[in-house]
Image (cartoon, rainbow, N blue to C red):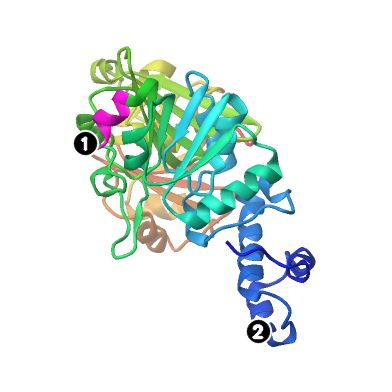
Amino acid sequence: MKIPNDSTRSFIQLHRHDNIHHLALQNERYPEIDMDWALRQIAGFQKAKTKLPSLAACESFYYPSSEALEQCSSEQTASYKSSLLKGTTIIDLTGGLGIDTFYFARQAIQVDYVEQNIELCEIMLHNCQELGYSNVTVHHESATQYLQRSTGADTLYLDPSRRIPERGKIIDPLDSEPNPIHLKELLMEKAGQRVMIKLSPMADIKKTLALLPETSEIHVVAVQNECKELLFILDKNPSSLKIITINIDIPNTYQFIFTEEEELNALPELASEPQQYIYEPNSAILKAGSFKTIATRFGLKKFHQHSHLYTSSELISDFPGRSFKLIDVTTFQKKELRNFLKGIQQANVAIRNFPISAEVLKKKLKLKDGGELFIFGTTDKNGKHLLLKCTKAILNF
C-alpha cells in the first residue's frame, strides 16, 4: 500500500469537497502530489460521508477501490447485524472495507478479519490503528483457507462477493464467491453458536431456504423503505424458522416478525370495495412475502389475492408501511376517468397487480411525476381494474 507524503495528505484535506473531474484535469499543476491516490481518497470520502458518516469523520481513514465501497454495508445495516451476534469471538470471513468488522468489534472481545486482497488488508491494518480497534486481527487469505486451519469462533459471518468481473452483478448465492452453499458444512463445523450469511436483496428467499434448510432466522433489512440485504442465520441449536423484517428509517425502526406457517394459514378477508384508508407494506415485508399475515395481524382487507394493497375504515397508525387516505376511486370508463383526473397535472403513480406498468399508466393519464397526490392502479376481488386517488394519511413516514 502506498504511504502518501505530507503534500498529498494536505492536498486531500484541502480538496476533499471539490469536483473529482476538475481536480484530475489539474494533475500537471501538482507534480509533488500522488494524484491517483489523492483522487481515490477524495472520491471515497465523498461517497462515505453519506453511507459511512462516522468513518468519514476520521480524516486519516483510508479508502480502497470504489468497488469495495459500493459493496460494503452501510453503517445502519452494520449496526443492525452487530445486534445479531452470539458469543464474544467473531470471524468476518469476507472483510472487504471492514465496516461490518468495525461494528462487530464494538460488541465482541475478539474479531478476526479475513480478506484475500492484500491492499484491503493493508488498508484495514491502518484504519484499525486510526480508529482504535485493538481487538481486530487481520488475516490475508481466502475464507476457505482460513476456515480450514481455524479453530473457529462463536459467530461466523460471510458476505460473498456479488460482483464477478466477467459477469457483473449476480443474485444467485450459488454464483457468489465464496459459495456459501459449498462452505455450509465447514461453516457449521467451525461455528460455536451461529453462522450469519449476507445475500443480495434480490436473491430468491424460497430457493435459498431450500439450499440452507438449517436456517433458523431470515432477516430482510431495508433502509428508508429500500431493501438492502438478506441475512440467513444458521444456529447450532435452531428453533422453528422466523422471518424478521426490519425497516430502518431514522429516528424510527419498524420490525415485523412472522412464520411460514402463519403466512400459509392466514385467511385475510377480501374487500368488496375500497374503504377510507389504503395501506402499502414496506419493502422488507413485501420482499419477505408476508402478503396475508400483514392483513390478518392488523385487521385489514385485501383488494385481491394478488393485489398487495390493503384497506380499512379506521386508520391503523402503527402500520409498518405507508398509509393513505382515499379521496376517489374510478374504473377506466372515459367519463369517470375524466372526472377523476379533473384539475390534476402531477401525481405519484404506482401499480399493484395491474395489467400495465406504472410508467405506461402515467403516460396514459398524461401526468407528471411528484406532488402530494398518489394514484394506485390495482385489481379488486372481482378482477376489475381500479384507480385509487389518495393522499398520505401519516405525513411523517
Part of the protein shown in magenta: 183-189
Q: Quadrant of residue 5?
A: bottom right
**Compared to 61, does 232 lie above or below?**
above
**Compared to 100, does 70 lie above or below?**
below
Residue hosting label 1: 207
Identify residue type, mark 1. Answer: Lys
Q: Nearer the viewer, residue 252 or 54?
A: 54
Report crowding for label 1: few under 14, some 14 to 19, many 20 or more residues within 10 A (C-alpha): few
Residue hosting label 2: 25
Q: Mark 1 or mark 2, which is nearer to you?
A: 2
- Horizontal relation, residue 348 to residue 207: left or right: right
Q: Nearer the viewer, residue 286 or 164?
A: 164
Q: Position of residue 116 (x, y in %)?
A: 41, 50
Q: Nearer the viewer, residue 327 or 197?
A: 197
Distance, label 1 to label 2, CA atoms, is: 49 Å
Counting labels gives 2
Label 2: state its secondary structure.
Answer: loop
Q: Position of residue 172 (x, y in %)?
A: 26, 46
Report crowding for label 2: few under 14, some 14 to 19, many 20 or more residues within 10 A (C-alpha): few
* Tag 1–tag 2 contact (CB < 8 Å): no
**Compared to 163, does 202 lie above or below?**
above
Q: Is residue 357 visible?
A: yes
**Residue at 48 percent of width and 55 percent of height:** 118
Q: Position of residue 192 (x, y in %)?
A: 39, 19
Label 1: state its secondary structure.
Answer: helix
Q: Quadrant of the C terminus?
A: top right
Nearer the N terminus, badge 1 or badge 2?
A: 2
